Image: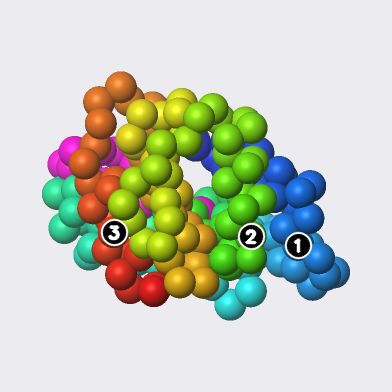
Amino acid sequence: MRRFLAPFALVAVLSLTACGGGDSETESDESAPSDTGQPASTGDVSPCDLTTEETVAEVFGGTVESAAEGEARNCEYTLSGASVMLVEVYYFGTADDWDALKAGYEANRGPLTPVDLGDEAFYPGDLLQNEHVVLAGDTVFAVGVGDFTTEISPGIAELAGIIAGEVD
């Protein structure tokens, strides 16, 4: 369950690619694994660059025990003594990718509910409000909990709003 969002993120990324989100050879190589086994960042942006451990700890309480790039263009923040055990921040690309990403989420994860964050944002129908996908300026990212829960974590929207304000 720890990597609950990762399969959905991969579906969204694959849908983005299938829908023509990337049109150059360089773009298609950017998500390939690096020599270290970690996913390569997209362009110059690492998902772990979108926020800090301190900000995650401030929003969710507790302590960030670790922060590391995950397997699906994401950064995993493992927390202790917090309202959630795992927060994931995904970097999905630029504004040019937004429409294809949004269509992929809708096709694979159900109806989208708009939220007032960044330039445009939504949460997918299958995870309540525990994942927010945001377009802010030229950056497309998502924030979610890594463990499935039926309780809504208000920290997701708060962290997404902080990141949107910083990247915009």
Cα–Cα gap, marks 1 and 3: 27 Å
Q: Position of residue 47 (x, y in %)?
A: 48, 63
Label 2: how many residues lie within 10 Å, few (<14), some (14-19) or many (20+)?
many
Residue 160: image location, x then y, percent: 33, 55
Reading the image, the residue beneath label 1 is: 22
- Give amino acid for label 2: Asp
Looking at this view, is 58 or 165 the one in front? 165
Residue 97's label in the rendered image is 2
Farthest right residue in view: 25
Q: How is the image coloured?
A: rainbow
Image quadrant in which the C terminus is located: bottom left
Tell me the distance, in whole angstroms, between the alpha carbons under discs 2 and 1: 8 Å
Query: Secondary structure beneath disc 3?
Result: helix
Q: Judge by depth and name the residue closer to the eye, 45 or 132.
A: 132
**Callout 2 touching callout 1 (CB < 8 Å):** yes
Label annotation for residue 40: none
Which region of the structure is painted magenta?
74-88
Q: Which residue is mark 3?
A: 161
Q: Which quadrant of the structure image shows residue 127? A: top left
Sooner in the amino-acid sequence: mark 1 or mark 3: 1
| Amino acid residing under circle 3 | Gly
